[in-house]
């Protein structure tokens, strides 16, 4: 502060009040210090008695520009008109970090970041199932909309389960159907995945569940519907046979969800216990097999269960949306669905992506293998574009049979069993020799 004080050349004391002889003598006897600069400029005594109308006393600092230096870290204070928050922000990093909060936290930041404003787990949708032609199964939509609506209602003497568990076969569109319903309802859910339900630190996943639930509750408190959506709960909190280790975090996630289901309006973070109630937020979870979860969690009072097995009409409706942009007529879609009755819905999405293989091969042959990287990564021309290939029913059936053949190979060959039961690598070529494809 000494340098900044030295930069202040002089201080003028002016007043419109008559000063007594004692007051004038005090001004004359003030010492010349480093803070006041070279001294005080004192006006004549006539000036002090010139007027008696004003009733204020004023000290004015006069800045000596010649004493301002580039090395003066506090030189800006002479011109500073900001508030204290900005002053603290400006001083960040000027002293040893031992005496300041970590970067990105504390009062050193003029604008504090908070989950009240932005949530890292909130999912927003820019799709409209009616405008973009996506199909929502009526039974699926009915179950999800009724569950969400009931949880925001005050039904007399009725205990509504907080959790809706949607389970079923793999690749049947559970998560995507949920997202379509959320978009239809105008809900931007708080998302969690199975990978967040385990951690190297004991108790962190359970704490994260509570934190995400409270984020959703803050959104509801602001007057907008919200849902906590957990994908593949059984993969993160379930127990898949004796080969899966049951950890403390698995146990605490199950217990936390049970506690939230029992007390949905009193969800506290560890170390924070107040009597303020939070809004109720419905929880929607998906999974493949809920029998792997802790049995008390899935009891009827806590979780309402919905087994999703799309009917033939549902499969045709979803596939019509998948191939709508490719101008595949409805009769061909029906024939395609009936040709692969045992396949999941995502099979048809993979089938559509497989049709573009021929176009990609043509592009690779035109560019040359050695030039692919320059054209795909940081290219000035942007990523390559293709004309939509003609998707005939014959081509779709051909690629569909190829995908089925690859599935059969995985189920039939099972090289891992051979490696464990036979020496070294086993006879890895036995299958291709028996099928007559080994020699081309």
Image: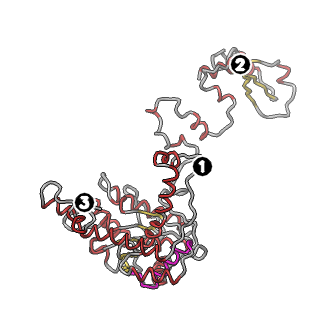
Q: For mark 1, what is the residue?
A: 381
Please tell me whether the stretch drawn in magenta is mainly helix, strand or loop.
helix
315 inside magenta stretch: yes
Describe the element under mark 1 as helix, strand or loop. Answer: loop
- Position of 195 compared to 30: left or right? left
Closest to the observer, 40 or 28: 40
Gap between marks 1 and 3 measured at Cα: 50 Å
Q: Who comes first in sequence, dot 1 or dot 3?
A: 3
* Rendered view: 102 above or below 50: below
> Is residue 122 shown in magenta?
no
- Secondary structure category for the residue under label 2: strand
Q: Residue at x 58, y 51 (%)?
A: 382
Q: Measured from the top left, where is residue 258 in percent x and y?
A: 33, 70
Q: Is residue 297 visible?
A: yes
Left or right: 123, with 163 as reference point: right
Label 3 neighbour load within 10 Å: few <14, some 14-19, many 20+: few
Q: Position of residue 50 (x, y in %)?
A: 87, 25
Residue of label 2: 9
Q: CA distance from mark 3 to mark 2?
A: 70 Å
Q: Residue at x 57, y 38 (%)?
A: 89
Q: Position of residue 84 (x, y in %)?
A: 61, 39
Report the label total. 3
> Which of labels 1 and 3 is toward the front?
1
Q: Earlier in the sequence, mark 3 or mark 2?
A: 2
Q: Which residue is most to the right?
A: 50
Magenta stretch bounds: 308-326
Q: Which quarter of the rendering shows the C terminus?
A: bottom left
Which residue is labeled 3 in the image?
A: 247
Q: Residue furthest front?
A: 439
């Amino acid at each position: 502060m000494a340098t900044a004080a030295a930069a202040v050349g002089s201080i003028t004391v002016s007043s419109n009040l008559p000063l007594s002889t004692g007051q004038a003598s005090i001004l004359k006897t003030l010492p010349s210090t480093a803070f006041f600069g070279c001294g005080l400029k004192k006006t004549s005594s006539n000036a002090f008695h010139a007027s008696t109308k004003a009733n204020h006393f004023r000290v004015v600092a006069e800045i000596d520009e010649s004493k301002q230096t580039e090395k003066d870290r506090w030189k800006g204070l002479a011109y500073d008109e900001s508030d204290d928050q900005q002053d603290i922000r400006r001083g960040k990093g000027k002293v040893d970090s031992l005496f300041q909060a970590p970067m990105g936290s504390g009062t050193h930041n003029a604008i504090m970041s908070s989950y009240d404003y932005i949530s890292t787990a909130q999912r927003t949708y820019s799709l409209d199932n009616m405008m973009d032609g996506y199909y929502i199964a009526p039974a699926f939509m009915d179950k999800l909309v009724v569950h969400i609506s009931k949880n925001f209602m005050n039904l007399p003497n009725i205990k509504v389960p907080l959790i809706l568990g949607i389970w079923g076969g793999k690749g049947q569109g559970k998560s995507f159907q949920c997202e379509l319903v959320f978009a239809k309802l105008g809900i931007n859910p708080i998302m969690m995945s199975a990978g967040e339900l385990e951690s190297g630190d004991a108790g962190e996943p359970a704490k994260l569940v509570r934190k995400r639930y409270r984020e959703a509750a803050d959104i509801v408190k602001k007057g907008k519907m919200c849902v906590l959506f957990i994908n593949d709960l059984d993969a993160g909190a379930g127990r898949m046979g004796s080969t899966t280790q049951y950890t403390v975090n698995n146990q605490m996630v199950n217990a936390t969800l049970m506690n939230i289901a029992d007390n949905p309006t009193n969800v506290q973070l560890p170390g924070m216990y107040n009597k303020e109630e939070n809004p109720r937020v419905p929880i929607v979870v998906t999974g493949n097999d809920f029998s792997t979860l802790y049995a008390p969690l899935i009891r009827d009072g806590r979780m309402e269960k919905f087994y999703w097995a799309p009917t033939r009409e549902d499969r045709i409706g979803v596939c019509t949306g998948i191939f709508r942009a490719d101008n595949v007529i409805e009769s061909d879609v029906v024939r395609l669905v009936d040709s692969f009755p045992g396949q999941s819905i995502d099979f048809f999405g993979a089938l559509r992506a497989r049709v573009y293989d021929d176009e990609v091969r043509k592009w690779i042959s035109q560019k040359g293998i050695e030039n692919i990287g320059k054209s795909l990564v940081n290219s000035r021309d942007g990523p390559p574009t293709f004309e939509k290939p003609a998707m005939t029913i014959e081509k779709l059936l051909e690629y569909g049979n190829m995908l089925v053949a690859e599935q059969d190979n995985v189920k039939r060959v099972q090289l891992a069993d051979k490696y464990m039961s036979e020496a070294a690598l086993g006879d890895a070529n036995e299958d291709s020799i028996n099928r007559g494809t080994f020699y081309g």
